[in-house]
Amino acid sequence: MFTTLRQNYRIILVLGLFSLLTGLSGSSINLALPQISIDLAISNSAATWIIQVGMITTVIVLVMFGHLGDLLSKTAIFTIGGYIFIAGSVLTGLAPNYWLILLGRFIQAIGSAMTLANSLGIVNQYATDQNRTELIAIIAMFMSVGSLSGPAFGGVVISQLSWRWLFLFNLPVGLIALWIGRHRFTIPKNLWQQTTQVTRHLNWLGQILFSVGIIAFFLSSYFAQGQHPNWPLTLLLLVGGLGLTVYSFYQDDHSLLAWIDPAIFRNKLYLVSVSILFLVMLVNAISDILLPFYLQSYGGLSALISGLIMMLQASVMFFVTPLAGYIADRWDAAKLTTIGLVILSASQLGYAFYPATMNLALIIPTIIANGIGMSLFLSPNNALTMSSVPNPLAGVAGSLSSLARTLGMTAGISLATSLLFIQLPGVVRITPQVGRSFLTAYRRVFLLAMAISLVAFGIMAWRLWQQRRQTATKKAMGPQ
C-alpha cells in the first residue's frame, strides 16, 4: 500500500494506459465499419458483428474474471489479460479475412474483460483511504481522454493510414504499459495450481447457462437480417436465449458458491438504478453505431470529418460530467438524473428527423444534446446506485453495474443494426443512392430509441414519486 501519487505512478500508468486503449477502441472502431465493409467486400450488417462479437464476449466473461481476481490475484489476472488483449489486437489488425477478424476480436475482448474487471480492485488494493478517490479519478481521466479522442484518432488513422492500425496501435502501447508494471504486476509461479484448486467448486453450470443464453439471444439478430430472414429460428433463439439468461441468474442465486452475491438481487433501489442504466446505455449505443453510416455511407463525409462531429458528444461529456457530479452532491441526484433522461429523449427525436442533406446546423445540436443528457444522467445515477448498497456489497455491485452498462451497449448495437437492415432487404451497403429508404428506416429506429428513453424516464419518475411518498409518510408519523 502506498501513500503518495509518486509511489503509485507505475500502477497508475499501467491501469491508465489500458484504460486509454479501451476508451480509444470503444469510440474509434465504429467509425471504421463503412470502410471495413468496402475493404473486405462484406455487407454493412456483417461489419457490425466486428463490434458485436467483442461486446458479447465481454458481457459473458466480465463478472467471471472479476470474481477470479478476488479469489486468485487481481494483478495476475490483469497482466494475463493484457497480453491476451495485445495478441487479439495484433490478430485483428493483420487478419486477411472477415472470420479471422472476428476471432481476433473475440480474443481481444477476453483480454479486455480481464483488465477491466480488475482495474478498480487493484486500485482498492494499493490505495489508502486518503488517496483512493484521487487515483480512481486519474484512471477515469485516461478512459475519458481515450473516449474523447477516439473519433478524431480513428478519423485520422482511417484517412491517412488504414483502419488496421486502430488495432495494431495497441501492440506498442500495451507492451510499454506491461513493461512499466513488470515489478508490481507479476504472475505467481503456482497460479495454475491455485486456479485448479479455487475454481473446482465454482458455479460453472450457471456460467455455461449464462453464456449460452447470451450467445443465443444476440445471435437471433443475425438470422433476422439479410434477403431471406429465418423468422422461426430468430424467434426460437430470441426467446430461448432470454429464458436461459434469466434462469442462469436464478440458478446462480440458489447455488452453493454463487458468482454474484444473492443479496444484491433483493435490493430494489439498486435494481431500479441498474435497470435504468441498462436502458440508457442501450439508447446511447444506437446513435454510436448508426451515425457513421449516416455521416459516411449515406452523407459522403470523410472518416475524419465524421470523427470530429461524433467527438462532440464525448467533448461535451468531458466538461459536463464533473459539473453534474458537483451539482448532484449538493442537490437532488434523482431529479438531476430525471432531467438528463428528458434531454436524452429529446436528442433521440432530433436524430429521428435528421435531414436528407448534410446540414451541420441541424446535425450538431442533437449530438450535443445527447452528450448533455448522458452527462446529467451518468454521474448522479452512479451515485444513487452505489449509495443504495452496503459497503460489503460494493464490489459485486460495481461488477454488476459494469455488466449492465456493457449489456446495454451490446443490446443497443444489436437492436439498431437488426431493425435498420430488416427494413432494407437486399441492401448490402448503405450509399447515397439508397436515399429515402435509408432515412425512413433510420427514423424508425430512433423513434424506438426515444420510446425506450421515455420508459427509463417513467421508471425514474416512479422512483421519485416513491421517494416523496416515503418522505411524506415519515413526516406525518413525526419523531418516534
Image (spheres, rainbow, N blue to C red):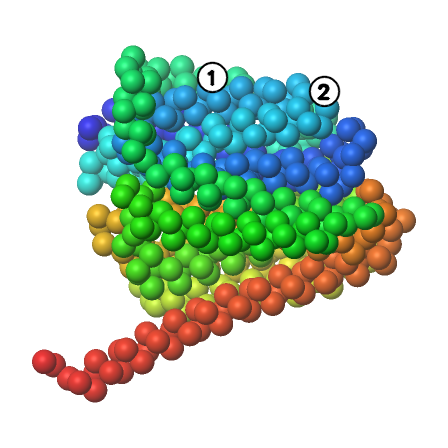
Q: Is residue 7 above or below residue 340?
A: above
Instruction: Give the x, y percent position of residue 267.
Output: 30, 60
Q: Which residue is mark 1?
A: 175
Instruction: Give the x, y percent position of residue 345.
Output: 58, 65
On the question of residue 76 being in view, the answer is yes
- Sort mark 2 into few (<14), some (14-19) or many (20+) by Cα contacts within 10 Å: few
State how far apart marks 2 and 1 are (Cα).
24 Å
**Which quadrant of the structure image shows residue 328?**
bottom left
Q: Which secondary structure lies at badge 1?
A: helix
Please state which amino acid type lies under the numbered disc 1.
Answer: Leu
Q: Is residue 240 left or right of residue 14?
A: right
Q: Which residue is mark 2?
A: 96
Q: Is residue 181 above or below residue 110?
A: above
Instruction: Give the x, y percent position of residue 85.
Output: 50, 25
Q: Residue at x 40, y 39 (%)?
A: 205
Q: Quadrant of the C terminus?
A: bottom left
| Residues marked 2 and 1 touching at CB (< 8 Å) | no
Q: Is residue 367 left or right of residue 281?
A: right
**Which quadrant of the structure image shows residue 177?**
top left
On the question of residue 327 being in view, the answer is no
Q: Which dot, 2 or 1, sits closer to the camera?
A: 2
Residue found at the very far left of the displayed protein = 480
- Sort mark 1 into few (<14), some (14-19) or many (20+) by Cα contacts within 10 Å: some
Q: Which secondary structure lies at badge 2?
A: loop
Please state which amino acid type lies under the numbered disc 2.
Answer: Pro
